[in-house]
Amino acid sequence: MQSMYKDDMPFLFKILSFDKALPLQAHPDPSLGEKLRKQEKRKYAGVYNSDCTSYLYYMEMNKMLTERHPVVDDNGKPEVSVALTDFTAFVGFRPPQHIKAFFDAVPEFAALFNSSQRQLIDSATNDDSKAKEALKSLFDTSIHLDPSKIKDTVEKLNQKLESSGPEGTFGKVDDAKALAQIWKKHGKIFGSKDVGLLVTTFLMNLIQLKPGQGCWILAGESRDKRSNYERNLLI
């Protein structure tokens, strides 16, 4: 392996075992990785890149630099993940029509955004620039919500979930029951002020894997590993 790759290993092999959700992350593609490597320890805090995925990575870098960990190489960081046990994750952003369905079914969620943002989702399609613009706008608004507004929304949905059940809360979507289970579990762990509850539930794709199943996570795509009690994953 060393003779093949010399001193530039293009992948990192990891076996993960964890008992609560890992933070929301995105990894750079090769061009962004090279750029960040060159910048190394220059300022990242407060930098906003027009590309939403780059912004996610800057957030991750803020934490790394605070802990004095440098950007160690300029490789892109896609992932191939294989489940060793039953595993649940949120990977990438939902298609605009899925988010629109949540707007229609969950007024508490829709109320977090202005009318122009909701109209942008209505007019967006899966493969046009409007979709990217709409998703970036919703994500940016979500992560900058006032904690009191997050808490109020989460508590309203908690009450609704108890009285109306999964479909009455999240709408008649295929993964309503799974979303309800994850919502309750992680609400207990992270509390009602955790914006991750809203971002993952309504903006990101939910995938559920059995042992031996896997998924491909492109560089630049966001992902959040939230699953049942003890999780094991081969990356």
Image: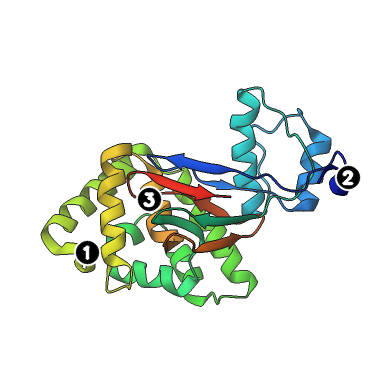
- Left or right of 16 in this view: 72: right
- Left or right of 132 in this view: 209: left
Mark toward the viewer: 3 or 1: 3
Secondary-structure class at tag 3: loop
Mark-to-mark CA distance, 1 and 2: 54 Å
Question: Which amino acid type corresponds to the residue marked 1 in the rendered image?
Answer: Pro
Check if mark 1's residue and mark 2's residue have beta carbons within 8 Å. no
For mark 1, what is the residue? 166
- Name the residue: 65% across, 27% down: 65
Mark toward the viewer: 1 or 2: 2
Question: Which amino acid type corresponds to the residue marked 2 in the rendered image?
Answer: Ser
Question: Which amino acid type corresponds to the residue marked 3 in the rendered image?
Answer: Ser
Mark-to-mark CA distance, 3 and 2: 38 Å
The vertical placement of 225 against 138, above or below, is above
Task: Specify which label sits upstream in the sequence, 3 or 1.
Answer: 1
Check if mark 3's residue and mark 1's residue have beta carbons within 8 Å. no
Q: In the image, residue 122 lies at what x, y percent?
A: 46, 74
The vertical placement of 148 against 157, above or below, is above
Secondary-structure class at tag 2: helix
Q: Nearer the viewer, residue 88 or 25?
A: 88
The quadrant where residue 206 appears: bottom left
For mark 2, what is the residue? 3
Task: Specify which label sits upstream in the sequence, 3 or 2.
Answer: 2
Q: In the image, residue 182 lies at what x, y percent?
A: 31, 53
Task: Specify which label sits upstream in the sequence, 1 or 2.
Answer: 2
| Numbered circle sitting on residue 142 | none
| Numbered circle sitting on residue 227 | 3
Q: In the image, residue 215 lies at what x, y percent?
A: 55, 62
Q: In the image, residue 53 lies at what x, y percent?
A: 63, 53
